[in-house]
Image: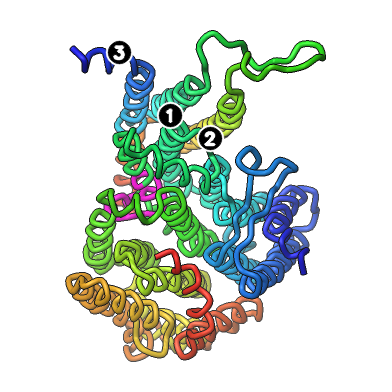
């Protein structure tokens, strides 16, 4: 059983070794299957980590023979185990879908590069979640930004290259801010290990109040820019909508989550609850989160193309996470973590459905989707499940995350936040439900006759159906997951 | 007077923050991609300077051991920041390389490295189609 302690670092190794052997594989099909196999192995390992943390509690792991504070240390708690499991399992589902779709969207010469970058991206996101060392986290953040930009540019057309440049420029701005914050924290504490920084920070923060304040601002700006916190989300719609289908799914569902988990780890681990309550972070997160869920929804409503609408919807859903963090209590934190899982599943499902629609019918704009439910019944059925979950109807996982965030708002005595959540749910309904209604209940426009239903290959339909079933199961029986993640909320 | 002394004592912070802001604003505001990349390197270098200077202790040697014998740690400066910045430089180089490669690609597609011009060209193409 003690071997499980090695699994988090092994998961990172497996992903990176898999990434490095991709260029050696000759056959494109084998390269795609290898990606699936590696992600599946990592998912199994991450499940074992979740089980271990559940029975034995949190643990620390020294990567090298030097122990902390000199060596790099992984600190695996409930939050980390949960996020690693989400990244690995959703990554596996996306890679299974990729068997069918990657060859159709990405030029043949780039497929192996795509697979290598995809695996490196999953590995580095696992690293952000697992590491207990702040400089190590910076290195993983940089690998994540480079590979995330890479899986957009593999499409190799004008639009995606331009979006990549934009994304990479803002990413490096954010990295600069994060590195400066790390330099400031190192300067006053002399440590890079998160536990040790926290320990020293509580002693020296009164001597250097300006350094701590500046570092916290830079952390918020840096991670906010990377995790598309409103109003720093302007790069997101281009990047996420011009990427290939599978890349959009990974970027929206997992990469944003990895950065927000990095932010959570630094805010709760480095600054800690006491320091955070002295800084004005709570209020900043609350206003930015409210802005994201309200204005992001309004922006999503004005979009005519479905992928752009989904990209703006990601800004809204990230806003819920920040809003839940700003509540500063157990229920709100549980809601934030459940929202990470909910959004990872739901947004992946929606992006994959949009990719299916575009590939099989060539339609991109919402206007053209009238009556498409007859032609693509499976795709539109799972799309509807995802849309209902984004709106937050009962019996879907989206309802539970909003329930916990709203309940946390009442516990914190912030009725304003509750009202914002309710209004934004209505706004979400205003742009998701028309798609579902026009797909199933409108006649196709003239000249666009009803055609035979499209037959999806199994590796395209199975992952989507699995995700739709998971969304409903998590909507009906969230208790096992909630019980597990509420362990991470004990810090409050 | 005391505030001037305070500022003078923290000249490293002032220098690196000035450089950081110069790099930051070039990266954010300049539309020429090559200048953006130069700005990014200035920004990263300013942070490296700050990091390295924090590990420096006046009057001590670089942490390079010559020959065997006993080692007195009090003779050397803190080697950790230098080791970290080695990693930081590698990261900055790879991001620079990636951005330069994308710039070449964009130049081949549009015939310019100016972001504003590229967006204008794209708009006019989208408007016609």
Crowd tier of the residue under label 3, counting other residues whose Cα lies within 10 Å: few below 14, some 14–19, many 20 or above: few
* Label number found at residue B95: 2
Q: Residue at x 52, y 16 (%)?
A: B57
Q: CA distance from mark 1 to mark 3?
A: 27 Å
Evaluate if marks 1 and 2 touch, with contact meaning CB atoms under 8 Å apart: yes
Q: Percent position (x, y) of residue A348?
A: 50, 70
Query: Mark 2 or mark 1, which is nearer the start of the sequence?
Result: 1
Which quadrant would residue A455 be assigned to in this image?
Answer: bottom right
* Label number found at residue B8: 3
Q: Is residue A46 left or right of residue A191?
A: right
Residue A24 falls inside the magenta stretch: no
In this orientation, does residue B126 appear?
yes
Residue A231 falls inside the magenta stretch: yes
Q: Is residue A491 above or below residue B52?
A: below
Q: Is residue A225 above or below residue A346?
A: above
Q: Percent position (x, y) of residue A203?
A: 40, 41
The one of A245 and B8 positioned closer to us in this rendering: B8
Q: Is residue A433 above or below residue A16?
A: below
Asked which secondary structure carries label 2, the reply is helix
Q: CA distance from mark 3 to mark 2?
A: 34 Å
* Label number found at residue B40: 1
């Amino acid at each position: 059983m003690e071997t499980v302690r090695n699994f988090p670092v092994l998961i990172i190794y497996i992903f990176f070794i898999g990434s490095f052997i991709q260029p050696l594989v000759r056959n494109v099909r084998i390269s795609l299957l290898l990606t699936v196999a590696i992600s599946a192995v990592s998912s199994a390992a991450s499940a074992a980590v979740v089980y271990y943390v559940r029975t034995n509690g949190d643990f620390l792991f020294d990567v090298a023979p030097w122990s902390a504070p000199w060596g790099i240390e992984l600190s695996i708690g409930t939050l980390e185990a949960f996020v690693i499991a989400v990244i690995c399992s959703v990554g596996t589902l996306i890679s299974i879908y990729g068997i069918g779709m990657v060859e159709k969207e990405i030029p043949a010469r780039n497929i192996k590069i795509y697979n290598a970058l995809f695996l490196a991206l999953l590995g580095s996101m696992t690293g952000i979640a697992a590491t207990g060392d702040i400089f190590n986290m910076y290195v993983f953040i940089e690998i994540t930004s480079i590979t995330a930009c890479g899986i957009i540019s593999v499409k190799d057309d004008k639009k995606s290259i331009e979006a990549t440049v934009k994304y990479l420029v803002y990413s490096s701005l954010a990295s600069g801010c994060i590195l400066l914050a790390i330099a400031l924290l190192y300067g006053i504490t002399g440590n890079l290990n998160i536990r040790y920084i926290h320990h020293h920070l509580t002693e020296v923060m009164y001597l250097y109040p300006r350094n701590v304040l500046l570092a916290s601002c830079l952390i918020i700006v840096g991670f906010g820019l990377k995790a598309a916190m409103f109003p720093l989300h302007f790069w997101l719609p281009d990047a996420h909508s011009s990427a290939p289908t599978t890349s959009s799914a990974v970027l929206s569902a997992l990469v944003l989550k990895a950065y927000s988990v990095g932010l959570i780890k630094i805010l709760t681990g480095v600054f800690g609850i006491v320091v955070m309550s002295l800084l004005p972070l709570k209020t900043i997160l609350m206003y930015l989160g409210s802005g994201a869920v309200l204005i992001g929804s309004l922006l999503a409503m004005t979009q005519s193309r479905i992928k752009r609408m989904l990209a703006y919807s990601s800004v809204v859903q990230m806003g819920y996470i920040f809003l839940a963090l700003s509540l500063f209590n157990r229920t709100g934190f549980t809601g934030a973590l459940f929202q990470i899982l909910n959004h990872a599943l739901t947004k992946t499902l929606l992006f994959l459905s949009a990719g299916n629609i575009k590939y099989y019918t060539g339609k991109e704009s919402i206007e053209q989707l009238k009556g498409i439910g007859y032609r693509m019944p499976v795709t539109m059925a799972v799309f509807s499940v995802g849309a209902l979950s984004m709106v937050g109807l009962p019996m879907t996982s989206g309802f539970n995350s909003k329930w916990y965030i709203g309940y946390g708002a009442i516990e914190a005595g912030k009725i304003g936040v509750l009202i914002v959540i309710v209004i934004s749910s209505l706004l979400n309904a205003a742009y998701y439900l028309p798609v579902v209604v026009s797909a199933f209940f409108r006649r196709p426009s003239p000249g666009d006759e009803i055609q035979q239903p499209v037959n999806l290959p199994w590796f395209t339909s199975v992952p989507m159906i699995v995700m739709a079933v998971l969304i409903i199961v998590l909507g009906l029986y969230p208790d096992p997951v909630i019980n597990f993640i509420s362990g991470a909320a004990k810090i409050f | 007077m005391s505030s001037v002394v305070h500022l003078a004592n923290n000249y490293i912070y002032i220098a690196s923050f000035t450089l950081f802001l110069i790099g930051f604003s070039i990266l954010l505001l300049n539309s020429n991609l090559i200048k953006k990349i130069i700005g990014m390197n200035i920004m990263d270098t300013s942070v490296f300077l700050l990091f390295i200077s924090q590990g420096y202790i006046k009057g001590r040697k670089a942490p390079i051991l010559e020959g065997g014998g006993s080692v007195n740690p009090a003779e050397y400066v803190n080697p950790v920041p230098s080791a970290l910045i080695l990693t930081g430089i590698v990261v900055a180089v790879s991001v620079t390389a990636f951005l330069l490669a994308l710039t070449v690609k964009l130049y081949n597609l549009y015939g310019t490295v100016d972001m504003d011009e590229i967006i204008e060209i794209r708009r006019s193409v989208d408007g016609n189609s």
